[in-house]
């Protein structure tokens, strides 16, 4: 397993950077960052001194290997000690296990799902993931699913008054594109899910979090701060 992890770490770093831009849908503002298969997209959680907790700490760690963050956002829910909630895989190593039971909170609003980074990108419903066990170099579980095979999560309510700044990821049908989105306005789940399906045309999408949602997009001059966070997803580019 250590050799496998080392191989991933030593894989060539793609020169491309995620394309980030501001957009709007149904009167709400969003920022999206689109990543193509073949770009160096990774998940980050811990270093020698414990959980990174911030985009800056990840960027400083990457500098040691001649890299830098191209873009990043928080990528799943976490416990008080910043440990991931549910499945978390980093560099081929399973750090925490898949959770498929229902429960309280957004994570337990089944179906939830897993964002998987392999040769291509996938968002897979958690119980289907348990049956299939796809190969993932990196994976993070969160919930609820927003869009499942082109259909909205059945428990999302169009008229819900639960509105927050929210972030998540959607993938194209062929798995060659992953689009990360954060709302710049407070929106409910239904509106956020429609943005992925109807605004971006993506058949599968997963909610990462709300209220604490943050984005690092230097191409837009954006570096959101706040409380320490758990899992982080981002692209690695050569250090300028």
Image: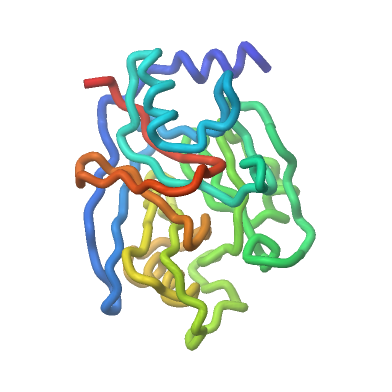
Hey, which quadrant is residue 128 in on the image? bottom right
Q: Residue furthest front?
A: 227
Residue shown at the point (49%, 18%) measured from the top left: 9
Identify which residue, 182 or 5, lies in the foreground: 182
Q: Is residue 214 above or below residue 67?
A: below
Task: Estimate the x, y position of residue 48 in percent, counting from the top left.
Answer: 58, 19
- From where the camera sits, is residue 53 visible? yes
Residue 183 appears left or right of 161:
left
Residue 38 x/y as whole percent: 37, 32
Q: Residue furthest bottom?
A: 159
Above or below 14: residue 129: below
| Residue drawn at point x = 58 percent, y = 40 percent | 139
Q: Position of residue 202 (x, y in %)?
A: 40, 61
Q: Is the N terminus in the top left, top right, bottom left or bottom right quadrant?
A: top right
Q: How many marks?
A: 0
Q: How is the image coloured?
A: rainbow
Q: Which residue is found at the position 49% from the left and 84% from the top?
A: 161
Q: Position of residue 105 (x, y in %)?
A: 67, 66
Say above or below: 227 vs 50: below
The structure residue drawn at horizontal position 34% and vertical position 31%, both measured from the top left corner, is 69
Q: Quadrant of residue 170?
A: bottom left
Residue 204 seen anywhere in this rendered image of the structure: no
Q: Nearer the viewer, residue 166 or 207?
A: 166
Quadrant containing the C terminus is top left
């Amino acid at each position: 397993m250590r050799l496998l992890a080392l191989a991933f770490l030593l894989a060539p770093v793609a020169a491309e950077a995620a394309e980030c831009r501001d957009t709007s849908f149904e009167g709400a503002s969003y920022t999206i960052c689109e990543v193509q298969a073949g770009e160096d997209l990774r998940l980050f959680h811990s270093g020698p001194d414990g959980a990174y907790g911030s985009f800056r700490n990840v960027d400083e760690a990457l500098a040691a290997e001649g890299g830098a963050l191209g873009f990043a956002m928080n990528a799943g829910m976490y416990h008080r000690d910043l440990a991931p909630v549910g499945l978390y895989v980093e560099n081929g190593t399973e750090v925490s296990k898949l959770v498929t039971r229902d429960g309280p909170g957004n994570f337990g609003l089944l179906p939830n799902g897993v964002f998987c980074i392999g040769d291509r990108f996938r968002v897979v419903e958690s119980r289907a993931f348990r049956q299939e066990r796809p190969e993932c170099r990196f994976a993070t579980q969160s919930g609820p699913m927003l869009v499942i095979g082109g259909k909205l999560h059945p428990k999302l309510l169009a008229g819900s008054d639960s509105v927050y700044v929210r972030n998540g990821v959607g993938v194209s049908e062929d798995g060659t594109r992953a689009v990360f989105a954060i709302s710049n306005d407070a929106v409910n789940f239904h509106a956020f899910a429609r943005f992925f399906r109807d605004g971006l045309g993506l058949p599968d999408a997963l909610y990462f979090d709300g209220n604490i949602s943050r984005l690092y997009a230097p191409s837009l001059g954006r570096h959101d701060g706040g409380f320490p966070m758990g899992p982080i997803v981002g692209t690695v580019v050569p250090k300028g």
